[in-house]
Image (tube, coloured by chain):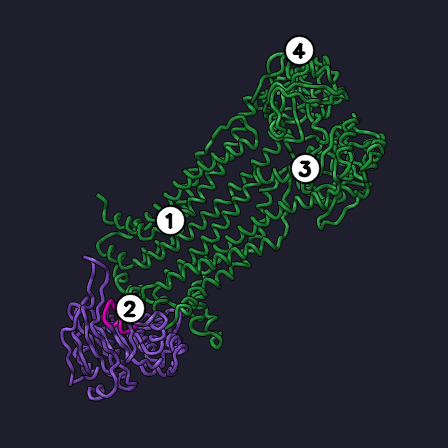
Amino acid sequence: MVSPLNRKLIRDLARIKGQAAAIGLVIALGVMMLVMMTGLVNTLDETRRTYYDRYRLADVFTPVTRAPERMVDRLAALPGVAAVESRVAGAALIDMAKGELPVRARALSLPDFGTPRLNDIYLTAGRLPESGHSDEIVLLEGFAKARGLVPGYKITATMNGAKRQFRITGFAQSPEFLYSTAPGEIVPDDSRFAVFWMRRAALGAAYDMQGAFSETLIALTRGTNPQSVINAADQLLAPYGAAGAYGLIDLQSNRFVSEEIRGLQVTARSIPPIFLGVAAFLLYIVISRMVQAEREQIGLLKAFGYSSWEVSFHYLKLVLVIAVLGAIVGSVAGVAAGNSLAVLYQAYYKFPFLVFAVDPRSFVTGFATSILTASIGSLFVLRGVFRLTPAVAMRPPAPPDYSRAFDPAGAMKRWLDQPSRMVLRRLSRYPGRMLGGVIGIAAGLALSVATLTVMAGFGETIDLSFTVMDQSDMTVFFVSNQPPKALLELGRMPGVDHVEPIHVAPAVLRNGTYSYRGALEGRPEIPILNRVIGKDFEQIAMRREGLIISQSLADVLHVGPGDWIEADIRQGHRPVLRLPVIGTAQTLTGAPAFMEIGALTRALNEPQQVSGAYLTIDEDYTEQIFEQIKGMPWIAGASLKQDVRNALVEIMNTGPGSVRFVMLAVAAVITFGIVYNSARIAFAERARDLASLRVMGFTRSETSFVLLGELAVVTLAAIPLGALAGYGLTYLMVKGFSTDIYQIPAIYSPQSYGWGMIAVLMSAAVSGWLVKRDLDRIDLVAALKTRE
Amino acid sequence: MTEQALKIPPAFTAKGLTKVYGEGTAAVHALRGVDLTIPTGEFVVLLGPSGSGKSTLLNILGGLDRPSAGSAHFRDRDLSAMNDADLTRYRRDHVGFVFQFYNLMPSLNARENVELVTEIARDPMKASDALALVGLDRRETHFPSEMSGGEQQRVAIARAVAKRPTVLFCDEPTGALDSTTGRAVLKVLTDVNEQLGTTVIIVTHAAATAQLADRVIHFADGAIREVVLNDTKLRAEDIEW
């Protein structure tokens, strides 16, 4: 048997179903975002962890020039080391079709029999190379797919200066290469970097590594600090040209994935509260309106002997039903959306499987926060229920008191007609309500502005990187450092206009406990083909006396101009340099540190060397240049600016950056939702006043003015506030969206503000029109008969 | 007054006026073919139990509602043929309304509530004059929340008469008031009728009000049961409540 009060509850819900649905939807969206994003983050995190575990990804990597196999046992004996596996790794160039740049590749060894103990690979097609078949390779699936290769195909690769033909026996995925990025490059690109695996004997022969290795992989026992093993390994391997051991955190692929998951986490934490806050505000307004309208019924219930608690609980139940239904819908939709997003991300990260890990806490959080926010909104209203005595409730309500209001309308008496005065008085009498509306609309605008600015920032990143900074056409990477005459050789090729050297010295940069595994980049005093620019896009000249570091590096190391940093060089004599920071540069990809190239050479105490070059070329000679490069064994590879640009755009649009499109849609929905609800509520509250005006002979448009004037004032007041809040929100969102690969600048983009405002004004116009339609249809007689 | 009515065209004439709400078995016949003439300048009281159709008639004559069948004329203009804009114009130029629950704008003070109407009327009186007429000239700057029910109703009347309406419609104007306040409000209405010559039509089920009327129209079940011409009008102060 349903109690009469509960029956009333059900009928009340049915009566306000439109508004209840709208509010429930906002709650559902908030909970959905929360469940979806946390589910996605958990799933990705868990999948990554499981993938690493199952395929035994190493904890420490120790690249060396050439070390004897016996060192493996020495490494294995280090405290905290659980397993060591040595392998041969080398750079290769894969010949592509004529007229195409050769593709840089990394060749890795598999043990002669079976599968690796560490850094196992997941075979997606075909089979592993057979022992003794030195011409068989397994190719990284991402590259194979990007290039349309199938098992059985033959490819030609240059290894250690010799051209050889290989047969592809299968494709593999590897936890080591979720993202594959060519050495020296920043932007991952499946089609321009390959990894292939061969049996150890074959690869060892190719690189002259019989009985030796060029890298070990180390697994640690649980609880071991990687840094102690890294230090010990560096010491052990120092005589063999150790390039510096590094931990899993510094593995480039892992670093990118971690960064991206972190970005998703930021979104997961910052967006849902906005939704839930808006929902609480709307519920507050709707319930307060209902309690006002039902004062008679409340009085009656109290007169019958219902306690204030019972009556309050009745209205609270209404709120709870909306909140709980919203949370249920949001949770279900969130799980579904999270799972389908995870499947998209699976393809993006090339996980061989997915471990769905929905976090039960996100449901609890979702339910708890939606119920809590909804209840807080209504608590204020329920205070009113307590205050109502049965007798008061049974009398018609006193008119709302405007006598004590701060009264700008009275002051401007001469210039205002009565309808304008009504608009103004309402705003000045109920500043809280007006402020609520203003804040709501401002929040929507801020969200739109920030999202749009971030969108513009993505474009800005691309433009700045590839038009203002990088003015070259092509970048060439050398196998190893070359004497300056290599530049002359490049310059002599027909079609090459300019050559600009770069000397990259891999280094661990430190400031106290802060460190970053990067490089020192030697550049000419005035770099032309790849400029270094300052905060205001002005070109910065390299100086001999110190480093110009990117702002992102400055942030990581917590240093600024005037500070000193330590550069632990990981090549050659491996000196440790102390260098002053003399300036910061604006960079949008990576976190480089620049130095004048001659000064860098002197600091390294080496003969003059370059590790690569930027070129500008004559387009007509492109193919010829590619062909010539293939014939230069000291060139490890080259990349065209246009290809890099395309790859970056691709990453921004398909990876976590794509969330920005969802956010834009969300911002638009929220903005419209708030504006429309404000208009609806204002209409509901004033139906009787408006009907009175119509009865007195005011026309429809004159009457609409009283209603829509308020909406207009609130909207206009919200615009500057929203723009300001948007400016702040931009910084937060930019942080969330920036990754190791690219930084999104918090630019000031007037268009974003313009479009955000237009969106708000459009929402206001459409909402106004929808409400005006209802106002035009208002039943004058009925509106006047109902008591307030 | 009645002789005068013969010379001047009547304020309202209705023929076969019918109003049906809803359809089929759920249909409610609020008015069942009412024929009626209301002479200009009279003080008319529509009496009858609730649901008898008197408010419906008032709403149709006041341009708030349209008949389902039959015709209602204000002077020579057919109200049932007017579109929405015409009705708005009609209400703006000719009609004043007073309701049971006053319907003042809470955000405007007494004078401003009156000015709401004088700003859009063709030939209004001064707002302060209208308030003086209802005896509230000293409370001009008070807001509705600062006034008693009777005072609020008097402001509503001032607002209604300030435009010098041809006709003043009052739906239960004393319904929410005690007898003393009710008398004061009725006094204002008779004053308006006598001093301004405004036709006043009052819907009520307080039979006492009938003692003030020139003409009392008794309603029952959607039809006119009886029209009584009152030759012994009392003053508002003298009626028995």
Of mark 4 and mark 3, the one earlier in the sequence is 4
Q: Which quarter of the picture shows residue A82? A: top right
Q: Which residue is label 2 attached to? A: B65
Which residue is under mark 4?
A: A132
Query: Which one is earlier in the sequence, the residue at label 4 or at label 1?
Result: 1
Q: Which residue is mark 3?
A: A644
Q: Is residue A378 visible?
A: yes
Frontmost residue, B189 versus B147 = B189
Task: Answer yes or no: is residue A562 visible.
Answer: no
**What's the residue type where badge 4 is placed?**
Gly
Tell me the amino acid under the disc marked 2. Answer: Asp
Q: x, y (%) of residue A446?
A: 54, 52
Real-space CA distance between mark 1 and mark 3, rounded to the nearest whole angstrom: 47 Å
Of residues A47 and B238, which is closer to you in this image? Answer: A47
Q: Which mark is first along the chain, 3 or 1?
A: 1
Q: Are marks 4 and 1 on the same chain?
A: yes
Name the residue that disc number 1 marks.
A21
Q: Is residue B64 magenta?
A: yes
Classify 10 Å Cα crowding around label 2: few (below 14), some (14-19), many (20 and above).
many
Q: Which residues are magenta?
A: B56-70
Task: From the image, state the color of chain A.
Answer: green
